[in-house]
Amino acid sequence: MTQNQSLQLSLPLEALVQEIKWDAHGLVPAIVQDASSKEVLMLAYMNRDSLGKSVETGQTWFWSRSRSELWNKGATSGNTQQIRALRYDCDGDTLLVEVDRQGPACHTGEDTCFFRTAAVGAGDAVPGASTGWTEFVPENQVVQSTDLGSRFAVLDELERLIAERYAERPEGAYTTYLFDKGIDKILKKVGEETAESIIAAKNGDNDELRYEVSDLIYHLLVLLRERNLPLDDIMRELERRHERPRRD
């Protein structure tokens, strides 16, 4: 979505306003989430006017309870949020705003407003401990996932990690290097890994093929992040194709 492009609503704005359960002050909490990484970025409040401005401009607008005025996220800092999807919950008393963001969401400069840990569950990692994911420089990025609950959990975690690298650009990280070099470098790497996967397959070497396809998938995810195209959109496209009538 380009800047200042209005949202395409599934129902008229007037009908959406009626669906929402506004509180006594005419407000509704709005949870802001990164559309790619699914990380919760912040919680703010919208009234009818800020919701209308958000729909009209495609950017997040909120109501400041302390200043009693509308505010546009990133208007002064440049850390804007382009809305990719707008949802409301089953009770109509909370909004979920999925965004493509530029820069950190928190006024402190942190990536998300929820950067402070109050407690962790039994057996979970403590703050500052290794999460089981590492990034090696300069040539290969080796990623491990300890989540065995889902067959494709590693893709979700890898997409999240790449989104963090895109936003934070830590010095020395290979993913940062790719984003800093730009689209041409990323496309070159995708092409190289595609060719190496083909060669591995022709050689009949499944160990080599597994390694090269893993590199290819990683670089494809970097490309999707560079183009602000979430993996969810690819999955939905695959679902649509799967649902089409077969022609054979």
Image: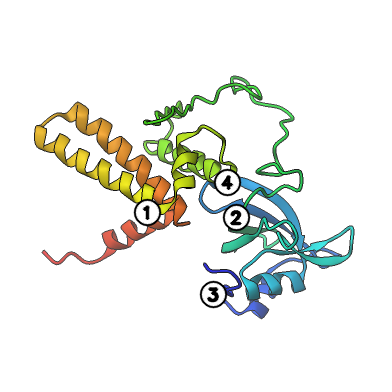
- Tell me the CA gap for discs 1 and 3: 21 Å
2 vs 1, front mark: 2
Residue 201: where, in percent of width, then height? 14, 37
Tell me the crowding category of disc 4: few under 14, some 14 to 19, or many 20 or more residues within 10 angstroms, Cα based: some
Residue shown at the point (20%, 26%) measured from the top left? 207
First reached walking from the N terminus: tag 4 or tag 1? 4
For this view, does 54 lie left or right of residue 225?
right
Residue shown at the point (37%, 48%) measured from the top left? 185
Which residue was labeled with disc 4?
167
Query: Which mark, residue 8?
Result: 3
Residue shown at the point (64%, 66%) measured from the top left? 59
Amino acid type at circle 3 is Gln
Q: Please tell me in which quadrant of the rendered image residue 64 appears.
A: bottom right
Residue 143: where, in percent of width, then height? 42, 29
Q: Please tell me in which quadrant of the rendered image residue 114 appears.
A: top right
1 shown above or below 225:
below
First reached walking from the N terminus: tag 3 or tag 4? 3
2 vs 3, front mark: 2
197, 116: nearer the viewer: 197
Q: Please tell me in which quadrant of the rendered image residue 66 appears.
A: bottom right
53, 248: nearer the viewer: 53
- Tell me the CA gap for discs 2 and 4: 8 Å
For this view, does 183 lie left or right of residue 74?
left
Q: Secondary structure at mark 3?
A: loop
Amino acid type at circle 4 is Ala
Which residue was labeled with disc 2?
101
119 shown above or below 33:
above
Residue 43: where, in percent of width, then height? 72, 52
Residue shown at the point (65%, 43%) measured from the top left? 111
Query: Which mark, residue 235?
Result: 1
